[in-house]
Image (tube, helix red, strand yellow):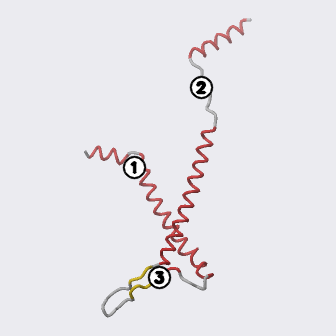
Amino acid sequence: MIQEFRKFIMRGNVVDLAVGVIIGAAFGAIVNSLVNDIIMPPIGLVLSGIDFKQIKIVLQAANEAANKPEVAINIGLFLNALISFVIIAFVLFLIIRAMNSMMTKEAEKPAAPPAPSTEEKLLMEIRDLLAKGR
C-alpha cells in the first residue's frame, strides 16, 4: 500500500498540481498586495480619502465592558477581495489565451514528411547506381 501511495504521489500530474497550487497561492498574495497597497489607496484618495478597509456597516458596536467584539459587515474588505478576483481572473484569461494561441500555432505547422522506408531507400540506391553506370 505504501508503494502504491508513493507511485500515486510521484506521478507527474500530482507534482504539477502541487507546484501549481503553491505558485497560485504566491500569485494570490502578490495580487492582494497589488490591490490593497497600490490600487485601492489612490482610488480612496480620489473618493475623498476613503480607506476601503474601513468601509463597513456596524450591526452591533463593540462593548468593552461586556467583552463583546464589534459585529459588522465589512463591505470594503469585500470590495478588495472582488477586485483581487477580477485581476486574477483577467491574468488567468491572458495566460490561457496565450497558451491556446501557442497550441494552435503548433498544430498549424505541417508535419515533417515521413522517412523513406527500407524498400524506398534500396530503390533509390539502385536508381543512383544505374544513373552512374550510364
Residue 114: which disc?
2
Give the residue drawn at x 47%, y 82%: 56
| Residue type, numbered disc 2 | Pro
Looking at the image, residue 14 sits to the left or right of residue 114; the answer is left
| Residue type, numbered disc 1 | Val
Q: Earlier in the sequence, mark 1 or mark 2?
A: 1
Q: In the displayed orientation, state which residue is furthest to the top.
A: 134
Vertical comparison of 69 with 133: above or below: below
Vertical comparison of 101 with 119: above or below: below
Q: CA distance from mark 3 to mark 1?
A: 41 Å
Q: Nearer the viewer, residue 93 or 27?
A: 93
Q: Are marks 2 and 3 in contact (CB under 8 Å)?
A: no
Label 2 sits on a secondary structure element that is loop
Looking at the image, residue 24 sits to the left or right of residue 6; the answer is right
On the image, numbered disc 1 is attached to which residue? Answer: 14
Q: In the displayed orientation, state which residue is furthest to the front.
A: 59
Q: Nearer the viewer, residue 81 or 109?
A: 81
Please tell me whether mark 2 or mark 3 is closer to you in this view: 3
Residue 105 screen position, x and y as percent: 63, 42
| Residue type, numbered disc 3 | Lys
Q: In the displayed orientation, state which residue is furthest to the left.
A: 1
Label 1 sits on a secondary structure element that is helix
Snapshot quadrant of residue 51:
bottom right
On the image, numbered disc 3 is attached to which residue? Answer: 56
Give the residue drawn at x 54%, y 70%: 83
Crowding around mark 3 (Cα neighbors within 10 Å: few <14, some 14 to 19, many 20+) is some
Q: CA distance from mark 1 to mark 2?
A: 36 Å
